[in-house]
Amino acid sequence: MKKKTRPSSSHPDAKAALRSIQKTLLVPFILAITVCLAGTVISLWLFFGNYFKSVSSDKMQIATITFKYKTAQRKLIARSLWDRLRQNSPVYNGDTIHTADISEATIHFIDGNTMDLLENTMAQVFLNEDNTFGAELMEGSATFDSTGAANGMTLTSSGTTILLRPGTVASGSSSEGGRLSVQVFEGSIQGEGMDLNASDGMILTDNGLEAAVLTVTSPKPNEKRMFHAGNSAPIPFEWRNTPLDEDEELLIELSPRKDFNEISRSVAASGLNSLSMDVGEGVWYWRIRSVVKGTSRAKHEEKVLSGRMQIFNSPPPELITPVNGYTYAYRARTPAVRLIWTDSACASSYQLLISKSPSMSNPVINQREPLTSRIISTLTEGTYYWQVTPFYSINNTGLEAPSQVGSFTVTKRGDLTAPELLLPRHNGNIDIANASDGIRFSWKDEREASAYRIRIYPNGRASSPLVNYVTSKNYYLLNMDDSPLNEGTWQWSVTQLDDEGNESPASDARTFYTMKGKLEQHTIEPADGYRVAETLMPDMQFTWKQNLPSQFKSTVQISTAPDFSKLSYSNKVNGSSMKGVSLSPGTYYWRLNAQNGEDVSYSTDPKSFVVMEQLDATRIIDPTSRAVSREGIPYQMKWREVEGADFYKVIIYRSTDNAIVYEDNVYEATTELDMFSTPSFVDRIAYHWEIQAQANSIPGKASRLSGKLAEGSFNLYKLHPVTIKVPALNATIDGVDAVLYPVKITWDAVDEVSLAQVVLYKIEGNRSIPVAKIPTDSQMENGRKIAPKTVSVESNEGLSSGTYEIVVNARTLDDLDISNTEPKYRGRFSVSPVPPLQEIENLSISPELMDIAYLSNTKNPRTFTTRWNAVPNATDYNVRIADSRNNTLYEERINSSETSYILDIDAMDASMKEKFLNGTFTVYITALRRVDYNKDGILDRVLQRSPTENVSFKMNVANPTKTRGKKGGLENPYAR
């Protein structure tokens, strides 16, 4: 059985069959394409023909339409299809306009009337027979404005026509049931048998036009407000008062939702006809409605008005470019100044003002800009101020909320400067034997340059350059094949060209040498900028390295000018170093110059060095003529700082033998010395000091540097403060002695004094209270200036207990203060409290009881006798007798020579006896020590007391009865 095989395309029969099939299918394919294209063309022709026929069926355009957010739709009067409109599309007689959700449109009639359509609104526009314009509001809401028209317009809804007179602003809304409500904000309208003025409203009902029971004059149904600062705009709500039931009130509600499912603010407004709310940015819905008082439940359905408002936050624009104070520069062509600012929301355009006055008066530029940038190319030299003010078409606001005033400056530059050359260096050497890659010439880039011109020519032949080339780069590569440089001396220079075609002066010609082989000659030390002290200048070594042919002779050149126009030193040298040059202070430049005798000179780049004069001498601050040292306190030696000094070398000599008593390097302008305890510092002799400022060397940058010597002398005085000999330090004085006897104070001083006042202080807490001054201040003023070495502190009352300090304010004959004011030198003692007298001992009384039984014995004395032992140092005893209530019945002071006290009942008068009839009585005894404080011989003050002791006795005598005498009277219970 034979195997079937697929014919190969390479076979001659297969190729013929393929060509036959292609020819058979080609004709039907072409025919199908032709029919499809013809159908498409015919369909388009019919569509556009029908469209333009409908458009052109009207005689004239009556309005244009603009819209925001989403586009509006238009249905031509002769068509059933809706067209999607573009901005500023024409509107024809009979067109029906429809806005969808979140869409707004404005119809601008050619006579100046406007109609704003809110979202979900449909209206048809007409040209009336009297050549006025009208609109039929089928559904939705619209605002009509005839303030810019010579004629008003008509509004039709459900067969009812209303005339809006010129100058009228009104709103209308039509519901699906044909209910039309109209509100007049400005001007007046005329309905069927009804005229309405501003603040009036009407409603179309089944009974015709009726006046609205509730009218709102602000805000409008589609209010738009802007604010430029803060977070909200104040929105005035105004309405006409309407009669309310007793249980009825008006409620104003604000919501972000059209269906008012979410209430942001709710305000009861009964009794008011206006109020204001601060409303933030966004779309808000408002309504005023009748509710049952105190609730949100509707009261009268017909008393409801609502609207929509948009609040825009449109802050003033901010100026971005140019930044404040920026400077533009030009030479011949004024600069293109690009002005950029931030966008302001809701602005349709911007007024750009440019003025030469910060008050923006007499602007040189005043133009309207649709974008947030502008390029101005007409400003000449001067300082300009600029400001941008947004233009708002919302509510016909116009220009509002300008930006801050910015400023910039336009300056006219001078001539172009010559470029600064870089390589090859001046007097540089180029090895042309190894320059196959070319020779590179470079210079610093210039900001204003658009191109450069380089000229290369033989030495002194600038008019015949070998190279005269213009390049946009800041370098040029010389190809030795195109422009070969022979051995010799060459020069080159560069000019710059700006974009205006101006050319700068040529740079200073720079010389370089070309030869086969590489020459080497460079300086090493001193390095560029090295500083050397004038005194060390002869020791400074100049070193270099060179590799030159033998015909070159080198010279060291030193000059005060960088171009070596005047030489301060010149000397031919051999080898690689030299020294021994003396120069005065100043700035110098040095180089190595080599010449071969054939007018070929090769110089190294100059290096600078500075010869420094000595540092200034310091000036002493302390000591000047004398130094006063104190024990334990280092003496501070001070002097003025010297600019450039790193430290100071300080030496002090003793004048008597020139011995060095102090030597140190000090890194501040002060040092502390112990001149009191150091044995080498002897009291009361002269010393000589030297201070010299020093600067450290900086390797490779500066040598060490010494200053001028400052020197002087002073006398040393070791200060020995006054010492207190008596009382001993921290001694304790008995309180009684301190009262009875004056406290003795003895002081001493090493030096003879010209002034000495002893001051005794009592220490109370943190205070020191002066108790005595010897001499007193008045005595010091009268010439008594020195207290005796021993003084007595006398006081009428003596020194009370406590702590005391002694200070002697003293000065020596050479006016040194040797007062012992420092705490460690002060005298200090304490006075103990005055102790009480010894207790009274063996206190007794007899009898202890006096009653009827005691009195019945006629031998018993009618007295109470109190006895005690004598108390040492007592001068008196105080006797007090008191009853059981501690009422004093009797008190007496007796002399210390008596140690008993007798209370004689018989000696008492009748009234006193009556007090002692019955009860318990107490005798109180206190020993006293009195002293004569004022030295008048009378013991007038109590110094010490003993503890009070007491003893009791009782009286138990019957109550007195009347006598049986003829004249009556009391019995004497104490009768014998």
Image (spheres, rainbow, N blue to C red):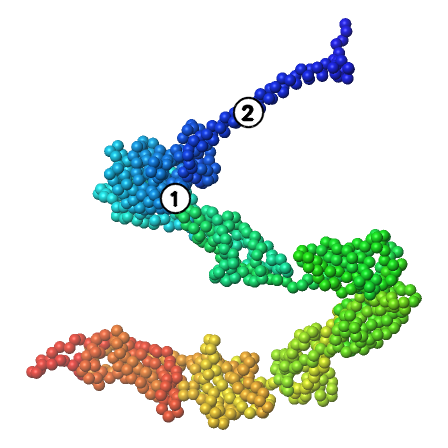
The answer to the question of whether label 1 and label 2 lie on touching residues, with beta carbons closer than 8 A, is no
Q: Residue at x 35, y 88 (%)?
A: 940
For this view, does 596 lie left or right of residue 317? right
Q: Farthest residue to the bottom: give it.
A: 783
626 relative position to 194: left or right? right
- Residue drawn at 53 percent across, 86 percent down: 809
For the N terminus, the image quarter is top right
Is residue 968 shown above or below 36? Answer: below
The amino acid marked with disc number 2 is Thr
Which quarter of the figure is the C terminus placed in? bottom left
Q: Earlier in the sequence, mark 1 or mark 2?
A: 2
Whether residue 865 can be seen here: no
Q: Is residue 562 left or right of residue 163?
A: right
**Label placed on residue 682:** none
Residues under labels 1 and 2: Cα distance? 43 Å
> Quick one: label 2, few (<14), some, or many (20+) residues within 10 Å?
few
Q: Which mark is residue 40?
A: 2
Amino acid type at circle 1 is: Gly
Q: Nearer the viewer, residue 650 or 543?
A: 543
Disc 2 on helix, strand or loop? helix
Which residue position is annotated with label 1? Answer: 112
Q: Position of residue 749 (x, y in %)?
A: 58, 89
x%, y% of residue 605?
Answer: 80, 66
